[in-house]
Amino acid sequence: MILLCSSEVGFVENQLVSKIGKAALSISGFLKVRPLSFDALSGVFPNYSKVEKVITYSILGGVPGLWKYFDPALSLKQNLTTHLLDPGCSLYDEGSRIVMDHVREGGVYYSILSALGEGRDKLGDIYDHTEFSRAKISVYLKNLMEIEAVEKVFSIDVRGRDTQRKGIYRISNPFLRFWFKFLYPHMSQLALKSPDAFYEQYIKGELERFAAPAFSQLVFEYMQSLALADELDIDVEEEGVFDGKDGYIDYLAFDEKRMGAVAAFACFEMPFMPYEVYERALLTLAGAKVKPDTIYLFAREGFDEKISLEAKMKEELVLICMDEWME
């Protein structure tokens, strides 16, 4: 047996067979190694709080090759300032290396990734930021998707599809998302300021908001596990997310005839979910024209009194804190 290993996923998936010609007939199969799970990272950083673990996972993703640069004995801030923000550390230029190892014309790709890092997630928004032609942006986005740096977000189909945001792109590589959110736009300040000063000014106040999509993905995976274990109120036939003009549904599932539905909403930016978040969730469901049998709300530490009271009166409203489902 001969095993050929490569970190160039895009090349293997899109070009390898054509490059090696008839020799490809000898290939008996492909095995794609997926990123490791959040639970695996939790075991590497046992002294971190659940919030710190989620933030760490949102930065390093499921790549153990990046985990090794963080010291479990140091605080999250110390790891960031020592192993990522210091010009002499290994991860300082890692975002640039990831891109330049796969593409040419780095400046064009940097501009597009910078726009995505700022939250400009539609083609028109990227056009306004970069002033590249839409055709050129589309080609470069396609290339970034091939190397799994960017992904296109597709919402689950609903009756209220007119409220859906379409053509949404986002950086799928967690480390690249962090690098282009915090480091790339402020490179001059990063060179002038101390790592501690840079962290305090540009990163500290934004970390929980930055980590919210990672928490949302963990909620999605947890809801999937409940569906597989038949622990939801419906027999799930179809599941996904909904990105609407009025808000985001972190998990939405339907049964076979779409007569039953389950929805879940996550809140990571603050310790306790305020009632306003629940109200916005109901507005999003109304816009999507979905009436779920059960609504799950996920918060870090708890829920405000008004939500807790409503949950006591409504069996279809389920409240879950991090301690109840996360290792």
Image (tube, rainbow, N blue to C red):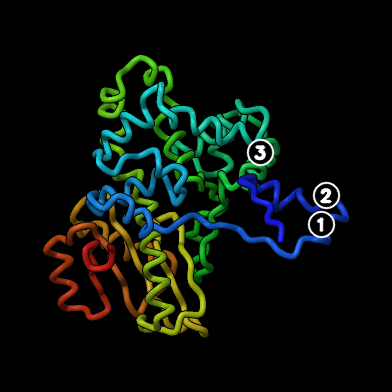
Horizontal arrangement in the rendering, residue 178 relative to residue 43 (left or right): right
Horizontal arrangement in the rendering, residue 21 relative to residue 102 (left or right): right
What kind of residue is marked 1? Answer: Ala
Instruction: Tell me the residue at 39%/52% (across/down).
Output: 213
C-alpha span from label 3 to label 2: 25 Å
Instruction: Tell me the residue at 51%/34% (across/down).
Output: 115
Residue 81 horizontal/vertical position (percent): 31, 29
Relative to 8, residue 197 above or below: above
Residue bearing mark 3: 140
Q: Are dots 1 and 2 in contact, CB under 8 Å?
A: yes
Residue 178 horizontal/vertical position (percent): 42, 38
Question: Can you name the residue that lies furthest to the top here?
Answer: 192
Instruction: Tell me the residue at 58%/42% (across/down).
Output: 123
Residue bearing mark 2: 20
Say which mark, if any, is on residue 24.
Answer: 1
Relative to 268, residue 141 above or below: above
Structural crowding at the residue carrying mark 1, measured as other residues with C-alpha within 10 Å and reported as few (<14), some (14–19) or many (≥20): few
Q: Earlier in the sequence, mark 3 or mark 2?
A: 2
Question: Can you name the residue that lies furthest to the right here?
Answer: 22
What kind of residue is marked 2? Answer: Ile
C-alpha span from label 3 to label 1: 28 Å
